[in-house]
Image (spheres, helix red, strand yellow):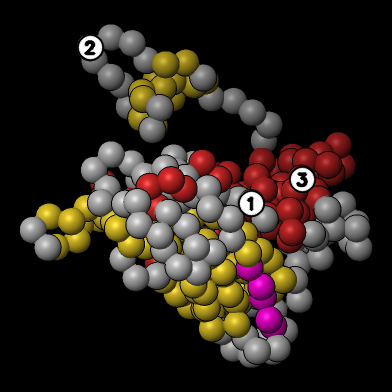
Amino acid sequence: MARQKGIIKLKGTIGDVSFYKSKDGYLAREKGGVDGDRIRNDPAFQRTRENGSEFGRAGKAGRILRNAFRLMLQNASDSKVASRLTREMLKVVQSDAANARGERTVQDGDLDLLVGFDFNNDGKLSATMYTPFSSVIDRGAGTLTVTIPDFIPSNTIAFPQGATHMKIVAGAAIVNFETEEIEFNRAESAEIVLGPQNEATFDLVANVTAGSPDDLFLVLGLEFMQEVNGTMYPLKNGVYNPLTLIEVDEA
């Protein structure tokens, strides 16, 4: 892969070289590679087919999980979240000890490997919120709870310049990776001034269907705002808002 230089940027194909625009700029690459029919049928490419199959499952699972939290990701995600989550989902697939290589699945893998995943690399929760918190998933009751102990915002929140307020948000999702069925709910705090006041302990409780037989996911994040003449405005379209997967309860 080569980067195009010069005043005129090319798009299209000239001979065996393809010119195209990507998020990284104008690039060029030489056409080539192994014939697709050979990859699908030649025994020599058995491992390639197995890897491709599992990568496909990982990509699909990542898409399903992103869809589950889509409403929250609109304000807290980076441009490469899809590829990053696929990479982590592939680790989950590869942790499946029940099925043969090429047949491994997300649902038979270790979903706890996803705990700690940041949906927004530009604003990580661990580098933004320094007050401790705890979480509990009660499958039988259908409650996913995050407890935030008392804290002083100006001492424990690394808020971006221009922010005057924030909300702490929690999201709960039931996900079935086979049927692609999802259920989502969220809970949020009141608007909190980013000042030296002491904020009392509170719980965020997101409710879903009680006793679900599917996988449960809990995320925690912050939404920064700026107050102007009594009106709250999202800060820079959420570019600094963290959102992290903090707990998983596997089916």
Name the element at disc 3: helix
**Residue at 66 percent of width and 41 percent of height:** 36
| Residue wearing tag 3 | 51
Magenta residues? Answer: 135-139
Q: Residue 205's spot in the image, x, y percent?
A: 52, 78
Which is more foreground, mark 1 or mark 3? 1
- Residue at horizontal 45 percent and vertical 74 percent from the top: 187
* Residue at the image point whose x is 33% and y is 41% from the top: 160
- Residue nearest the viewer, comparing 148 with 199: 199
The answer, for residue 241, to whether it is visible in the render is: no
Farthest residue toward the left?
Answer: 229
Looking at marks 1 and 3 on the same chain, the residue that comes earlier in the sequence is marked by 3
Which comes before the other along the chain, label 2 or label 1? Answer: 2
**Residue type at the position of mark 1:** Gly
Q: How far apart are marks 3 and 2 (CA)?
A: 41 Å
Q: What residue type is labelled 2?
A: Ile
Q: Up-down: is 181 above or below 48?
A: below
Q: Residue furthest top?
A: 6
Q: Relative to 240, is 67 on the left or the right?
A: right
Which numbered disc flags the more N-terminal residue, 3 or 2?
2
**Real-space CA distance between mark 2 and mark 1, rounded to the nearest whole angstrom:** 44 Å
- Residue occupied by mark 1: 116
Which residue is disc 2 drawn over?
A: 7
